[in-house]
Amino acid sequence: MAEDPVKLLGCWVSPYALRVKWALKLKGIQYQYVEEDLQNKTLMAAFSKKGEEQERAVKEGRENLKILESGLEGKRFFGGETMGFVDIAAGWIGCWAQMTGEIIGINLIDGETMPLLDSWFQDFLGIPLIKECMPPQDKLLEHSKELHKILTAALT
C-alpha cells in the first residue's frame, strides 16, 4: 500500500506554514503545498496598536526578544551547532520584525541592542533551504502594509 503524499495547507504569508515547510525540507520529506485563501477567514491582531499602547507593546516585545537571545550565548543555533526545533519555531520572527520596522518605523531587533539575535536571524534567513521557502519579500511587505492599514483603520 503506497503512502499518501504529505499535504501542507497554508497561506504564503503564514509563519506557521513557513515553519512546517522548513521542517519538511530539513527532514527531506516530499510534500504538496496547497495555498489557502485566509483573507476572509480571520484577521491577525499583529501590529495594530498606536501611541502609548504601541510603546508598551514594543517594550514588552523587546524584553521577550532579549530572553530569546539569551538562548544563543556561545552557540550558532539554539540547540548548538545544528538547526533544531527552536530555530524553526523562532525563525519567522526576524522576517516579521524587519517588516514591522519598515511599516511602523520601529526597529525591534538590531545589532547594537541584540547582537546575538540579530546575527542569528541574518544567518538563519540566509540558509539556502530556509531562503528557498521564504515568500517574496516585496510581496510580503505589500501584504503586511495592507494588513496594517486594515488593523489600524479598525482602531479609528
Image: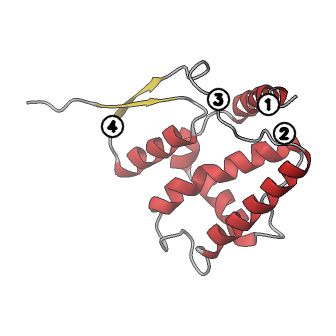
Q: CA distance from mark 4 to mark 1?
A: 33 Å
Residue at image mark 1? 145
User: The residue tagged with tag 1: helix, strand or loop?
Assistant: helix
Q: CA distance from mark 1 to mark 2?
A: 6 Å
Q: Amino acid at mark 3?
A: Leu
Lower position in the chain sequence, tag 2 or tag 4: 4
Residue at image mark 2? 103
Contact (CB < 8 A) between labels 3 and 4? no
Q: Is residue 37 left or right of residue 23?
A: right
Q: Identify the residue shown where x is 64% and y is 75%.
A: 70
Quadrant position of the C terminus in the picture: top right
Q: Amino acid at mark 4?
A: Gln
Lower position in the chain sequence, tag 1 or tag 2: 2
Q: Position of residue 114 (x, y in %)?
A: 76, 69
Q: Residues within 10 Å of mark 1 (few under 14, many from 20)?
A: some
Residue at image mark 3? 43
Q: Identify the residue shown where x is 35% and y is 33%.
A: 31
Which one is in front in this view, the residue at disc 3 or the one at disc 4?
Answer: 3
Contact (CB < 8 A) between labels 1 and 2? yes
Residue at image mark 4? 30
Which one is in front in this view, the residue at disc 1 or the one at disc 3?
Answer: 3
Q: Residues within 10 Å of mark 3 (few under 14, many from 20)?
A: few
Lower position in the chain sequence, tag 3 or tag 2: 3
User: The residue tagged with tag 3: helix, strand or loop?
Assistant: loop
